[in-house]
Amino acid sequence: EELLNKSEGSGCIKTYLWTIRRAGQEGDLSKAIATFRQFQEEKSNAVDSMAYNIILDACCSNKDMATACEIFDEMAERGIKKSQVTFNTMIKGFSIAGDLKMIKETMREMEACGCRPDLATFCCFMNCAAKALDTDEVWAILDDMEARGLPTDSYVVSIMMHIARRSPCARAAWKALSILDRPGVKISGNAVVLVTVLDACIYRRHLKYLDRALREFTATSSNFEPGARLWGLLIKACGALGRPEQALKMWRDMLARDMLPNNITLGCVIDALVEGRRVDEALALFQEWKGKVKCDTITYSTLIKGFAAVKDADRALALFGDMKAVGIPLNHVVYTSVIAACARSGHIKRAEAVLADMEAAGIPANAITFSVLIRGHCVCGDLEAALEVFHRMLDLGLPADCIIFNTLLDGCVQCSNWQLADTLLEDMKKAGIEQSNFTISIIVKMWSKRGKLDNAVQTVYDALKLPQTVPERVGRRFQGPNVDTQVASSLIGACIHNADPERAMVIFKDMKTWPNFDGPDSHAYGALVCGLAKHGYIREAASVAEEACTTLRSKYDRQSL
C-alpha cells in the first residue's frame, strides 16, 4: 500500500497490477478487488483488458465466479474488448467450479466475438468433463479438437489417464487408455504424463501399455530426473509385468542417481520381488534398508504375504513378532496374512492362536480372515473344524459369500463328503448367493468324482442358459461370459476321468461356439490331448495338439499387441 501511494506514472500502473495479482495468489480476494477499484478511480484510462484479465484470474482462482461474472459483464459496459485470454480465464474458473453449462455458454460467446478456442480452452473444458466422469462429453471434446486440428498434447493425455484410473466403468477406462495409441502420443514425454500413465495402467493391469512405458522410459530417461513417486511406479510396473529382475535394476538405477529410497519405493521393490516368488531376496533387501528407511505396515504385510505364498509360517511369524517389538501398527491385513501363512503350511493351531491374538487386540476378523482359516482346515481334511469356524463367523453376524462357500465345497470334494456338499449347495441357493465360475468348476469336479458325468455336463450347459453377470475391476457389473476357461477345462477333465474321450471331443468342439467364451485355453487343450493319448486316441490327440499350437500362438500374439 505504501508502494502504491509513492508510485507515479507507468511504474504506478505496474505496481497496481502486481498488487492485484499477488493478492489473488495469496487468497486475499477482497484486497485484490479493492486494489482494482482503486486503480479504476485513479488511473481509469490505463485500465485495459490486461488489468481485467488479472482481476478475473484472481476471482476464478479463488472460486468466486459470481464476482468474476460481474466483472466480465462490466468489460462490455465499459467498452473493454475481451481477448482470448479473457475467455480462457473465465473457462478456467468454470472448470474449477465444475460448471460444464457455463463453459459451453462462454465458448459460444467466445466464438461469436471472433476469438477462436485454442488448446488451453479445450483442456479446461475437458478437465471439467473428466472430473465429472462424463466420458461421452470428453470424447465429444476430443472429436471437436481433432476436427479443428488441435494436437493431443501431454495435458490431454494426463486427463485421459485420470479418467482411466477413476472411472467406475472398466470399459470406459480401457477406452480412455486407447488415447495412447494415437499418432504422436509419447508416454515418457515428461514425468507428469509418465506418472499418470503408469498409475492408470498398473491399476487397470494393462500390460501392453506398461511394457511400452518402461521401454520408452529406458530410451528417454536422460530427458528428466524422476522423483520418488515416479521411481516407485516404475518399479511397481516391473512387478505387475512379472519382471522382478527389471524391478531390481530400476532400484539400482534409482540409487545410482543419488535418489534416496523412501518407504514407498522400498515397498514397491519388495512387492515386485514377492510377486516374482523371490521372497528371500525381498527379505534381504528389507534387512539391508530397514535401519535407513522407516518401514511401515504395508512393507511388513507384503513380506508376510510373500511367506504365506511359499508356506513359510516360521518367517511370517518372526516378522509379525518384529512388528510388535518395533511398534509397527497392526491391522486386519497383517493378521490375516499371518493366519494364511500358518494355515497354508498346516499349522492350524498357530493360526487359531493368531486369530485369538487378533480378537484380543480389538481388531475384528472379517470374512476374508475366516475364509483363510476355513481353507486351512479343509486342506488338512478337517471339514468338521472348517464348519465350526464357518458357524462361528455366522454367529458374529458376518455374511457368508461365494468365496466362503467355494472353500467349503472344494474341501467337500477333496474329502468326498457328498452329503455336506449337497447341503452347502442348497444353502447357497436359499441365501441367494450367485454361483461364480469357480463354483461351477468345483461342482463339475464333484459330479466327476461321483461318477455322474451327465450331471457335470448339465451343470455347465445350465449355466450357459443363464444371463449371468460378473464384476468388473472396480465394482460396476456388466453382462459377461456365462462360463470361463477354468470351467471348460474342468468339464474336459471330467469326461476324461469318466473314460469318455469321445464326449470330451464333442464338448470341445461345441465350446468354441459358446457365447462370450474366451477359449479353449492351454489347460483345456492340455487336458484333452493327454486324455485322448491315455485312452489310445493317438491321431486325434496329435490333431488337437497341432491345433493348439496354431490357436494359442495366435491368441498370444493378439494379447501382446
Image (cartoon, rainbow, N blue to C red):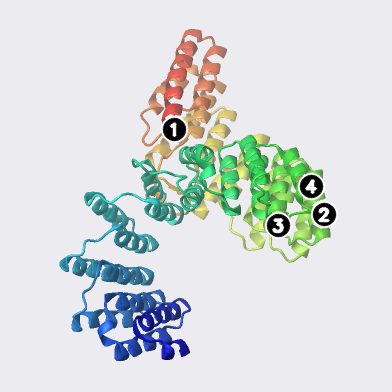
**296 sits left or right of 501 in the view:** right
* Alpha-carbon span between mark 4 and mark 2: 15 Å
Vertical order, 95 against 126 (above or below):
below
Closer to the eye: label 1 or 4: 4
Pointer 1 or 4: first along the chain: 4
Pointer 2 or 1: first along the chain: 2
* Alpha-carbon span between mark 2 and mark 3: 13 Å
Residue 559 shows which numbered tag?
Answer: 1
Task: Provide the residue designation for mark 2.
Answer: 321
Closer to the eye: label 4 or 2: 4
Pointer 3 or 4: first along the chain: 4
Q: Dot 2 lies on which element?
A: helix
How many other residues sit within 10 Å of disc 1, few (<14), some (14-19) or many (≥20)? few
Q: Quadrant of residue 553?
A: top left
Residue type, mark 4 in image: Gln
How many other residues sit within 10 Å of disc 3, few (<14), some (14-19) or many (≥20)? some
Q: Residue 212, position in %: x, y?
A: 47, 38
Task: Provide the residue designation for mark 4.
Answer: 287
